[in-house]
Image (cartoon, rainbow, N blue to C red):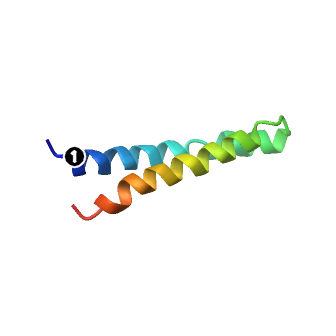
Amino acid sequence: MHFRAITRIVGLLVILFSGTMIIPGLVALIYRDGAGRAFTQTFFVALAIGSMLWWPNRKE
């Protein structure tokens, strides 16, 4: 199997998923409902994990 290609694609998908946390996080911050911090933390954690998966395999 092509584990490097699979890892690269999964990393990109996780990075895209982290991008989906931006709008709900902004809405939570605007309405001050207390969930803004959770969305922000999830964004950064998913971005970091996705980047760690994608970065070493980006040139394949």
Amino acid carrying mark 1 in the image: Phe
Q: Which residue reaches farthest bottom?
A: 59
Asked which secondary structure carries label 1, the reply is helix
Q: How many marks?
A: 1
Q: Which residue reaches farthest left?
A: 1
Q: Quadrant of the N terminus?
A: top left
Q: Quadrant of the C terminus?
A: bottom left
Position in image of residue 27 (x %, y %): 75, 41
* Image side of residue 6 versus residue 23, left or right: left
Mark 1, Cα crowd under 10 Å, few <14 / some 14-19 / many 20+, is: few
What residue is rendered at 39% in x and 49% in y?
A: 12
Position in image of residue 24 (x %, y %): 67, 39
Res 36 → quadrant: top right
What residue is rendered at 84% in x and 38% in y?
A: 31
* Image side of residue 4 versus residue 36, left or right: left
Position in image of residue 40 (x %, y %): 68, 47
- Residue behind mark 1: 3
Position in image of residue 52 (x %, y %): 42, 56
- Depth check, front residue: 42 or 21: 42
What residue is rendered at 38% in x and 52% in y?
A: 53
- Depth check, front residue: 28 or 50: 50
Q: Where 15 falls versus 60 (above or below)?
A: above
What residue is rendered at 23% in x and 51% in y?
A: 4
